[in-house]
Image (cartoon, grey):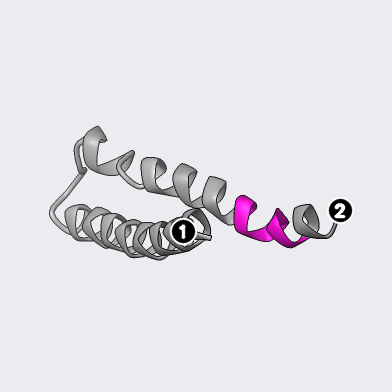
Amino acid sequence: MILQVSIRQAHRWLGILLALTIAANFAAMAFGTPPPAIVYAPLGPLSLLIATGLYLFFRPVRRSS
């Protein structure tokens, strides 16, 4: 039960982190070509968000079988 709550909370915070990195990306683009570190920054949170989202999506299927 504690693991499920932790994963759901991590999923929420990863969504916020992803939104912030995308906003930083757009803000950096306003000043010219942004460095690659800013351009690729959203990929980390996005990959973790996909992993936790898939876990939360398939969790009810795993529970019923």
Give how far across and how far down residue 24 sits, in percent.
22, 57
46 above or below 12? Answer: above
Amino acid type of disc 2?
Ser
At which x and y percent is residue 41? Answer: 30, 42
Residue under pointer 2: 65
Residue 56 is a magenta residue? yes
Q: Could you say which is closer to the camera, residue 20 or residue 59?
A: 59
Under mark 1, the amino acid is Ile
Which of the labelled discs sits on residue 28, or is there none?
none
* Front one among 36 and 41: 41
| Farthest-out residue, left | 31
Q: Secondary structure at mark 1?
A: helix
Residue at image x 48%, y 53%? Answer: 3
Q: As drawn, is 18 to the left or to the right of 28? A: right
- Residue occupying image coordinates x 26% and y 61%: 20
Q: For this rendering, which residue is in front, 44 or 10?
A: 10
- Residue 23, given in percent of the width and then of the height, sits at 27, 62
| Start-end of magenta stretch | 54-60
Q: Is residue 56 above or below residue 39?
A: below
Which residue is under mark 1? 2
Dominant secondary structure of the residues highlighted in magenta in the image: helix
In this view, 33 is above or below 18: above
